[in-house]
Amino acid sequence: MKDIAIKADVILLPDTTDMNAWACIACDQFTSEIDYWKQLESLVKGKKTTLDLTLPEIYLEDNPEQRIKKINQNIKEYLDGGVFKNYGKGFILTVRKTPFVERRIGLVTAIDLEKYEYGQKTESLVRATEGTIEERIPPRLKIRKDADVEFPHVMVLFDDEKRQITEKLYERRDEFKKVYDFTLNMGGGSIEGYFIDQVDDILSKFSDLLDKDRLIEKYGKEDKFLFAVGDGNHSLATAKTHWNNVKVSLSEEERENHPARYALVELVNIYDEGIYFEPIYRYVFGVDKENFLKGLKEVDGGNMQVYADGQSFVQKGENDLPEGIRSVDKYVKEFIQTFGGGVDYVHGEANLKKLVDDKGDAVGILFDKLDKADLFKYVSKNGAFPRKTFSMGEGVEKRYYLEGRRITK
């Protein structure tokens, strides 16, 4: 069997009857919507919850050191208090329903960080799909370096056009032990989980995806490209950085199976009917709109729409989608450095326009949708897309923190 960068490991789940309070949305969502987080805090107060164990990015400038210290304290208290239970080594088949899709199938497993690189262009088995911003790693690293347990929101895509892996497992789901089935809080839909302890056949099918003839047919070359990070690239990059720091002091034998070498993720087939790509828009605020818009007219953003003062206009250029986004991001960054202001990355046209309408000094920039069928071929040929090119679905559809895994011995 070929090296496929994944393995069955012990997955921790909470010993609680209130799973609705336990699972919380990914930390990098709703970063301009404080009301979401305040409502969530009120909902889960006094209950066992992953909100105690993670740091929403909206609070990165609000006493982060104190918050991180409390998070690591909470993790230890949860471990010592017997909050977690496990079913042995295996995978968890997830079945997610959202307000927008009837079903999305995933497979929670541990991925080998030695086989993952987040550079713009690599030949690793596991690759980033968007550019990585190095300054986003340190605050996450401060949590991970002292944490005993990780809780992932990373979703990793694989390219199985014949639907031979997760879809087939879904058809057999009644054969597996159901370990959770509940409604997610804050409008996230619902989720079911099934524990799978017999994994050899699954590993073999992933290995088949690396067949030489298949790779040449798909990518025009024998590119051993198995997994593409769809969501949570910065969190996985943090795990990689942490592992690089840890392994320096380990022997070769210790490195082979140290828990920090792996990171828990959810694998999803890019052809899954519950996977669809949505554009991520730029919300630029705190700027002189007239000055900003004047400069933006000189930027080739490809086919983009600009929203300001309650009105939209289309600005067409020659660049394709990735290059258009790169050009716009370069302009926004340089403008803010020179004149001040800020930028956030927003899902949903309605959300963006509401944010712009609520401010007198804001502009929204909207891009076209990326065709998901182009993802693997593009990354194989060109490397990662610009950061925040696309999102897999809407904000409420993002992965919730649910399963955990020990990353210390």
Image (cartoon, rainbow, N blue to C red):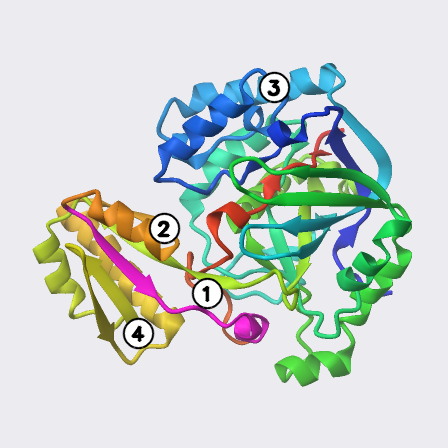
Work out whether 336 lies above or below 168: above
1 and 3 marks in contact (CB < 8 Å) = no
Name the residue that disc number 2 marks.
345
Confirm whether the magenta stretch covers residue 220: no
Which secondary structure, mark 4? strand
Residue drawn at (65%, 56%), measured in percent from left and top?
104
Work out whether 102 lies above or below 255: below
Name the mark nearer the viewer: 4 or 1.
4
Looking at the rendered structure, the kind of residue marked 3 is Lys
Q: Which mark is residue 47?
A: 3
Mark 1 and mark 2 lie on one chain; the one further toward the N terminus is 2
Task: Identify the image quadrant of residue 323.
Answer: bottom left
User: Which residue occupies the foreground of this view, 189 or 321?
Assistant: 189
Name the residue that disc number 1 marks.
385
Name the residue that disc number 4 marks.
303
Alpha carbon distance from label 4 to label 1 = 16 Å
Mark 4 and mark 1 lie on one chain; the one further toward the N terminus is 4
Question: In this view of the protein, can residue 105 be seen by the observer?
Answer: yes
Looking at the rendered structure, the kind of residue marked 1 is Phe
Name the mark nearer the viewer: 1 or 3.
3
Alpha carbon distance from label 4 to label 2 = 18 Å
Looking at the rendered structure, the kind of residue marked 2 is Tyr
